[in-house]
């Protein structure tokens, strides 16, 4: 009988064997690597099963709940009063007839339908105006616009979305691009948004039975980085101010999420102002 040294994975051990040492050594190594392959295959199957269980629990609502509730009008008004004790002429909470919603396509998909009316809170700032749209509790967009010489430059964009009990907030700091022509660029730590603002023309809109002259402005943007896609907002501003009389929002973006893969987000909404008189 021979005593054969066998080495594998950096550790040495000795096997007492009757076969020639070379044959015994190769057989031991083959069995060892065969066991490792079976272990790796078993771990892969276990991971797949766990992912399927998590996906099923998520889709059925056992793991995360997903609710979409209207933003309480009383809370919106109270927030405005607390933040703007000395409102300017345009400031206030405006009500808009609203149609549309948002959706996410992962794990069976979720859709949030927006209520029949939503609000935009208008607050004057040193360079222009800040517009906060409360679509749902947990879904809002804030646009910061600086005005001058007839232009409305986007200087900030704050997006909040909530799905499956998780709230995601992204703030973009924006600035006009060199050369003018309405081009702008926004950035976050995770990505960027580049786009252009273009004037379509003047139209007349009916607001609460009153004919109001409006300036139609279209903003198109491309999102890159952690999120990827396109966004378009059509604005109809009261011609003498930055009060939105109507807006149409369209968004198609996506991002990669752990375990569930690529998640696609979609939003379509139309808002029309009910009255030129705000709540204060």
Image (cartoon, rainbow, N blue to C red):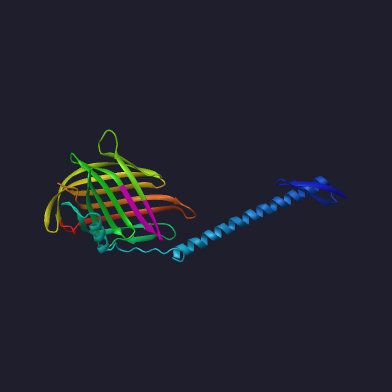
Question: In which quadrant is the C terminus drawn?
Answer: bottom left
**x 48%, y 63%: residue:** 56
Residue 115 among magenta residues: no
x, y percent for residue 6: 78, 47
x, y percent for residue 115: 27, 62
Disc tally is 0
Closer to us: 108 or 7: 7
Give the farthest residue toward the top. Answer: 179
Q: Is residue 229 left or right of residue 82?
A: right
Q: Is residue 202 left or right of residue 24?
A: left
Residue 162 among magenta residues: yes
**x 14%, y 55%: residue:** 206
Q: Is residue 69 above or below residue 10?
A: below
The rendered magenta stretch, by its main secondary structure, is classed as: strand
Bounds of the magenta segment: 157-169
Q: Is residue 249 above or below residue 174?
A: below
**x 31%, y 42%: residue:** 174
x, y percent for residue 100: 29, 58
Give the farthest residue toward the left. Answer: 210
Residue 193 quadrant:
top left
């Amino acid at each position: 009988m021979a005593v054969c040294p066998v080495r594998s994975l950096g550790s040495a051990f000795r096997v007492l064997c009757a076969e020639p040492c070379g044959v015994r050594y190769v057989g031991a190594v083959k069995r060892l690597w065969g066991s490792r392959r079976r272990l790796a295959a078993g771990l892969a199957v276990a991971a797949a099963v766990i992912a399927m269980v998590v996906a099923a629990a998520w889709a059925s609502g056992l793991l995360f709940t997903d609710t979409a509730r209207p933003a309480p009008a009383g809370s919106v008004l109270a927030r405005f009063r607390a933040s703007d004790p000395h409102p300017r002429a345009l400031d206030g909470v405006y009500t808009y007839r609203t149609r549309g919603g948002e959706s996410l396509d992962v794990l069976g998909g979720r859709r949030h339908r927006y209520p029949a009316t939503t609000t935009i809170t208008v607050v004057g700032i040193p360079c222009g105006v800040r517009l906060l749209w409360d679509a749902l509790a947990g879904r809002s967009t804030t646009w910061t616009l600086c005005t001058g010489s007839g232009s409305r430059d986007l200087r900030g964009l704050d997006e909040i979305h909530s799905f499956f009990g998780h709230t995601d907030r992204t703030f973009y700091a924006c600035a006009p691009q060199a050369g003018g022509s309405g081009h702008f660029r926004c950035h976050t730590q995770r990505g960027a948004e580049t786009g252009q603002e273009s004037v379509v023309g003047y139209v007349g809109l009916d607001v609460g039975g009153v004919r109001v002259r409006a300036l139609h402005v279209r903003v198109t943007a491309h999102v890159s980085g952690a999120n990827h896609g396109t966004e378009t907002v059509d604005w109809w501003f009261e011609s003498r101010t930055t009060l939105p009389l109507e807006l149409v929002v369209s968004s198609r973006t996506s991002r990669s999420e752990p375990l569930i893969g690529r998640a696609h987000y979609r939003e379509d909404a139309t808002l029309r102002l009910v009255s030129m008189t705000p709540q204060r």
